[in-house]
Amino acid sequence: MACCGNCLCCHCCCRDEETLTPEELTILGETQDEEDEILPRKDYESLDYDRCINEPYVEVLEGMNNKKAKKYEAVRWMLVFAIGVSVGLVGLFVDFFVRLFTQLKFNLVGKSVEECSEKGCLALSLFELLAFNMTFIFIASVLVLIEPVAAGSGIPEIKSYLNGVKIPGIVRLRTFLCKAIGVLFTVAGGLFVGKEGPMIHSGAIVGAGLPQFQSITFKKINFDIPYFRTDRDKRDFVSAGAAAGVAAAFGAPIGGTLFSLEEGSSFWNQALTWKVLFCSMSATFTLNFFRSGINYNKWGSFQLPGLLNFGEFKCSDGEKKCHLWTVVDLAFFVLMGVVGGLLGAFFNYINTRLAKYRMRHVHPKAKFVRVLESLLVAMVTTVVIFVASMTMGECRDLASPTTNNNSTALVSLNEDVINSTIRQFFCPNKTYNDMATLFFNSQEVAIHQLFHQDGTFSPVTLTVFFVLYFLLSCWTYGVSVPSGLFVPSLLCGAAFGRLVANLLKINLGMDIYSGTFALIGAAAFLGGVVRMTISLTVILIESTNEITYGLPIMITLMVAKWTGDFFNKGIYDIHIHLRGVPMLEWETEVEMDKLTASDIMEPNLTYVYPHTRIQSLVSILRTTVYHAFPVVTENRDNEHEFMKGNILISNNIRFKKASVLTRAGEQRRRCQSMKSYPSSELRNVCDDQAVAVVPALEEGQDMLQQMLERRHVPYPNLYPDQSPSEEWTMEERFRPLTFHGIILRSQLVNLLIRGVCYAENQLSATQPRLSYAEMTEDYPRFPDIHDLDLALLNPRMIVDVTPYMNPCPYTVSPNTHVSQVFNLFRTMGLRHLPVVNAVGEIVGIITRHNLTHKFLLVKLRQHYITI
């Protein structure tokens, strides 16, 4: 039977299990050996971005005029602005408390270290630091236990959502609260994570929830505003919210817009681009306004555009020969891009192994084990930071001169800022501990120092710092706390770039600007890890506020991506794959065009008739897990159908006796599953029918006569008691079916719950009608068939599904090439794609599962074997 709703495991296989390839084993969710074990795959429900043009929706369109349309569009713009402002305020909240907790921790521990360095009680200082960090991490871990989806950065989940896959709980209010509060404790707890990734996730949740005017977590938040309650509208607002999160994190509204376009949305248009950019601008300037006022007491000055500020890159006015970069430096930037790609690929490989280990050995155990793992990571990180700062740091002069004055750049931070961020542990006056200065400050301050303080870090310190940060950040990403990867990658790469600059200046005596090499190193490593190009280039340019860096950053990111792609995918794509999410790439491989829609479709269909008894609908819904069903009528050789106006008339509807008896037998099998239902009436009906369908030729003739005498309706009700069965023969299963439309499971359940039906002796026009607001009232969590009280239903009543089905979905021909099918499915954001032949008969359905890369590989292999 076909999967008409979401991505289920493939039931089609042409060979025995012993000869299956690794790709086929992946599709089937099976394994070969421990080394190549495929992690368990989940069945994710797809989102439906296509509009359902049914009668309730048409009624809304008919009541829409230009004035109402403009009002509707004005509400959209107001919501986009509200999303941007809200995301900016969320960023302000997170930043304020992270700074508060971090300053409190480092000030107390710093004073303790200075006092204990003379008294010999450093163990007490270490204990204080451990107490702060482990308390904060414990709170963050508990929040993740409340809502597990809040773990990690959230970017893989948001990418999946915008690609058309529904991740349960990903945009809930409870997830937002656990994410926003948890990330501030995680960052303040000293783990090597950033708050920028979770800001993107938080922005997406704000975008998804604000236009709904209701909350599932808090039931009292429920305003009767039935607008924007479709997957299509929600996707647009999620795109805007994610872009606003990037804009607030980096002060990069254009980069945020490109991030949503490049990394997320499969469908895009000009109007959406303008709204997303406006939302990003709103978030950036909201955050800038409040941060500038709070930090500098200059309200309206707009001096702090984002949570992460790289500062100003410029040479000293007195250094005429100093340049930020030259053409000669491009060769080194390309090499740094290669090294960054290799390091990023190695980082992703190690993190993948760790993630698989967690999924096999940590996640299946009790939940408190995840908390213990987070506390273990926090303890090890704290001890490493403390020991490295106390034992491996070098004492450096506060204003260290360089060997060549021509290469000197002004320190962009003033003396007050420098003095407030340097750490003097175990060093005499006018000197400071360079290792402690990097470790005992926030990550943003450390990045700022690597970018702008020239000649103040020794090569040994940078090497040790890079290695420790690389390993610990790789271990940390994936633990059960809200965590981002942007800032750790930038800091790790900045240390690498600064190390390269030091070696070039000391060993080769080159006149270079060290801050530029630190920036390029940060871009190289981050690009090697996440494999982003366009959006990351613009984000870094906007963060530096230096357009001349556009070319070197772009070249470095491209080289890093190409190098890393030789070995593995980006870190976010890897984690999407590990979760078993059926992501669709931008396009298929050229070789896949050897396949057609008929090669990849699912031909075994579970369908409903235009007029179907409640008994049959309940049976179908309770014995299948599919999320959509084609609405069909049978098309026999002696049945001639034609169109007259808007009414479909069927003539000469006759069945063979054997067909009638076979379908009656199927009803008997269906009734066996109905006997367990709580409704005594349903059980009695099933018992009566079980007797009535005893194979007797006379009774079969009577049923045939009843069908022939039934009045004609616009959509013929051929036999509403029956439903398709897995036990049909091949001839019965592939009988010709005229396709009229498609209806979702949620719509059928909604019709049953609201009692939309009519009696057998009545006209279908007497059936109650539902409005568009009533059809979408329960969005996004529609009731389940198991929530239905069957005792209240009359199983003999008939449901006319034609007003509520989608009569004009996108369809393809069986001979359509896979590339055309893929482009139509992805760009239009479809959930189901019926395959209809030239005479209007449905022959199969294509879902997201049928277009995944590994499924296509299996089908291509079968195609070669057939040839």
Image (spheres, rainbow, N blue to C red):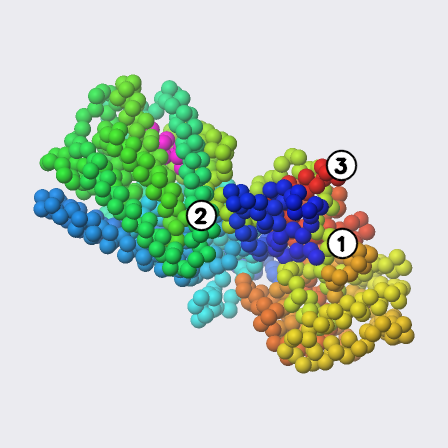
Task: Choose the circle earlier in sequence order: 2 or 1.
Answer: 2
Q: Amino acid at mark 3?
A: Ile
Q: Residues within 10 Å of mark 1 (few under 14, many from 20)?
A: many
The residue segment tinted magenta is: 516-527
Please name the residue shown 84% across and 67% down the image. 660
What residue is disc 3 on?
867
What residue is disc 1 on?
842
Q: Secondary structure at mark 3?
A: loop
**Mark identifier at residue 119:** none
Q: Is residue 233 above or below residue 472?
A: below
What residue is disc 2 on?
357
103 relative to 272 in the view: left or right: left
Provide residue 236's location: percent of width, then percent of height.
52, 52
Provide residue 701's location: percent of width, then percent of height.
89, 72
Front: mark 3 or 1:
3
Q: Decide: marks 3, 1 in contact (CB < 8 A)?
A: no
Q: Is residue 755 visible?
A: no
Q: Decide: marks 3, 2 in contact (CB < 8 A)?
A: no
601 relative to 70 in the view: left or right: right
Q: Secondary structure at mark 2?
A: helix
Q: Is residue 30 above or below residue 61?
A: above
